[in-house]
């Protein structure tokens, strides 16, 4: 647990559990925290890379306070189900951020070659500061620009997109680019928030955001803009049925969703498919 001089410790899993309990027991209290006004999702998504640039230095500390965050990434990586610890495979990690999803892939498939891509230069800078095997390479590019950034590479034997699709300005176009970079039969794991299909999940998400995530983001960074965007963008994102259909429309087959455990069950999901 991280502490700062003159400030209380970062909120613990116990506090998160308490927030979840409050959401379950007294849902009417959170009605006043519903987003008000129009949320211009495409405009907000267009500027999200700059917000990640601004908060890159503190990102790992903040997500480290989230119970299950790293294990859930490893779980989605395992669900790609690549054989032989990834031997002979090349895996694409799109939206790698500071490399947390990349680390999940390295741990799960130590024999694979991994190409990790992100649109935020500062997040990538943080990722590159870490120790990596020679099989990992980082690329600065938007998901929509993979065709240019990875010219001559691929197709890839697997793809992990963690917390990416929700942030794409044009989701259908972005997903189509991801699918285009998969080899025939190759798997994709979309690790993403989705609460639109469950009123309970929306209440829990709002409770945790306003009791933990937004105050913590403000405390650590001095600006909670990214974390308010996170709250609103998750509420505005696809339900699972819509997200699955979006992947099918892009040409994927065997599309299905598997849950995670802990407080994020029903909130974070692995949506799987195969080209």
Image: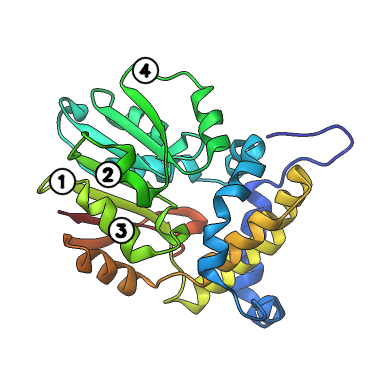
Classify residue 263 as left or right of residue 83. Answer: right
Indicate the quadrant where residue 213 lies: bottom right
Residue in the image at 23% along x and 23% along y: 111
Label 1 sits on residue:
186
Classify residue 189 as left or right of residue 21. Answer: left
Q: Looking at the picture, how far across and down is residue 119, in whole percent?
A: 47, 44
Pointers 2 and 3 in contact (C-beta within 8 Å): no
Label 4 sits on residue:
133
Pointers 4 and 1 in contact (C-beta within 8 Å): no
Mark 4 to mark 3 CA distance (whole Å) = 29 Å
Residue in the image at 40% along x and 64% along y: 170
Packing grade of label 2 (10 A; few <14, some 14-19, many >=20) is many
Foreground disc of the pair 3, 1:
3
Residue in the image at 48% along x and 54% along y: 262
Mark 3 to mark 1 CA distance (whole Å) = 15 Å
Mark 1 to mark 2 CA distance (whole Å) = 8 Å
- For residue 175, the mark is 3
Q: Looking at the picture, how far across and down is residue 193, in whole percent?
A: 45, 60
Pointers 3 and 1 in contact (C-beta within 8 Å): no
Indicate the quadrant where residue 252 lies: bottom left
Secondary structure of the residue carrying numbered label 4: loop
Position of 172 relative to 136 (above/below): below
Packing grade of label 1 (10 A; few <14, some 14-19, many >=20) is many
Label 2 sits on residue:
159
Classify residue 230 as left or right of residue 153. Answer: right
Packing grade of label 4 (10 A; few <14, some 14-19, many >=20) is few
Classify residue 143 as left or right of residue 34. Answer: left
């Amino acid at each position: 647990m991280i502490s700062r001089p003159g400030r209380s410790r970062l909120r613990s899993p116990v506090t998160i559990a308490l927030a979840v309990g409050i959401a379950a027991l007294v849902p009417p209290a959170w009605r006043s925290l519903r987003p008000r006004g129009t949320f211009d999702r495409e405009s907000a998504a267009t500027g999200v890379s700059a917000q990640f640039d601004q908060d890159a230095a503190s990102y790992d500390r903040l997500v480290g306070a989230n119970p299950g965050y790293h294990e859930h990434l490893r779980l989605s990586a395992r669900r790609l189900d690549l054989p032989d610890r990834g031997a002979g495979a090349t895996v694409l990690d799109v939206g790698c951020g500071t490399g947390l999803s990349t680390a999940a892939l390295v741990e799960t498939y130590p024999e694979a070659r991994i190409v990790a891509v992100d649109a935020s230069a500062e997040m990538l800078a943080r990722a590159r500061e870490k120790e990596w095997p020679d099989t990992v390479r980082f690329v600065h590019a938007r998901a929509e620009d993979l065709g240019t950034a990875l010219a001559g590479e691929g197709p890839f034997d697997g793809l992990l997109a963690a917390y990416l699709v929700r942030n794409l300005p044009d989701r259908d176009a972005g997903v189509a680019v991801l699918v285009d970079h998969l080899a025939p039969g190759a798997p994709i794991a979309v690790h993403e928030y989705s609460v639109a299909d469950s009123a309970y999940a929306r209440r829990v998400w709002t409770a945790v955001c306003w009791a933990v995530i937004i105050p913590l983001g403000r405390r650590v960074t001095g600006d909670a803009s990214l974390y308010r965007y996170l709250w609103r963008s998750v509420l505005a994102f696809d339900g699972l049925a819509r997200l699955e259909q979006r992947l099918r429309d892009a040409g994927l087959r065997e599309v299905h969703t598997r849950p995670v455990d802990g407080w994020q069950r029903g909130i974070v999901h692995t949506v799987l498919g195969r080209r």
